[in-house]
Image (cartoon, rainbow, N blue to C red):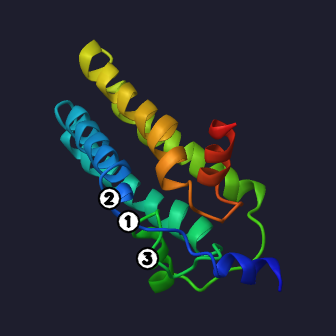
């Protein structure tokens, strides 16, 4: 049995933990980030939302979910896997260096952009920073990525490093 067939038989568990842990934190961050930008530059705030949508569709669905052994299944990445099945054909092989770098850089920008608009408000800035730490330091590695078998995803790599 090849490696792909082994991982296909072990679909990640999808349940309430993902819905009630990472997703609300991420949506809260997006809302707070949108508001931070909107209060200074409303048009740019809508550009930020477009950036998030593009990141989710391209960064997650195309680059990772289309190559994932759990392609087309509901998983801990919530909708990205199902979105990949609707929009992209399944792809095979390891991710290239660019494919591994793009989501990390895009995600960093997703978090840094709102912070630039709240540098004058320490409480707001700290709230955004705490949300990031909780999402990517605790919730993602120990809940969202814990059951996934896809070793080429940057989320799984981060999860494995944090657990060590």
Q: Residue 16 at x, y = what percent? A: 33, 61
Q: How many marks?
A: 3
Q: Which residue is mark 2?
A: 19
Residue at the spot 59% in from the left edge and 51% down from the top edge? 155
Disc 2 and disc 1 in contact, CB within 8 angstroms: yes
Where disc 3 sits, the SS reads helix
Q: Which residue is mark 3?
A: 83
Badge 2: residue crowd in 10 Å (few <14, some 14–19, many ≥20): some
Q: Say which quadrant the N terminus sits in.
A: bottom right
Q: Is residue 84 left or right of residue 164?
A: left
Q: Indicate which label's residue lies in the foreground, 2 or 3.
A: 2
* Residue 142 against residue 68 in the figure, above or below: above
Q: Indicate which label's residue lies in the foreground, 1 or 3.
A: 1
Cα distance between the residues tagged 2 and 3:
17 Å
> As rendered, which of 73 and 32 lies closer to the eye?
73
> As rendered, which of 46 and 107 lies closer to the eye?
107
Where disc 1 sits, the SS reads loop
Residue at the spot 38% in from the left edge and 57% down from the top edge? 18
Q: Which residue is mark 1?
A: 15
């Amino acid at each position: 049995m090849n490696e792909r067939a082994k991982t296909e038989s072990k679909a990640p568990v999808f349940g309430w933990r993902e819905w009630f842990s990472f997703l609300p934190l991420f949506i809260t961050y997006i809302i707070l980030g949108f508001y931070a930008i909107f209060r200074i530059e409303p048009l740019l705030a809508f550009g930020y939302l477009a950036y998030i949508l593009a990141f989710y569709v391209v960064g997650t669905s195309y680059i990772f979910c289309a190559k994932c052994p759990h392609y087309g299944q509901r998983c801990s990445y919530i909708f990205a896997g199902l979105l990949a099945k609707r929009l992209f054909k399944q792809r095979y092989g390891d991710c290239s260096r660019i494919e591994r770098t793009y989501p990390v850089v895009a995600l960093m920008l997703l978090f840094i952009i709102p912070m630039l608009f709240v540098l004058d408000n320490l409480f707001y800035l700290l709230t955004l920073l705490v949300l990031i730490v909780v999402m990517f330091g605790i919730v993602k590695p120990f809940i969202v990525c814990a059951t996934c078998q896809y070793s080429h995803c940057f989320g799984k790599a981060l999860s494995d490093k944090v657990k060590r």
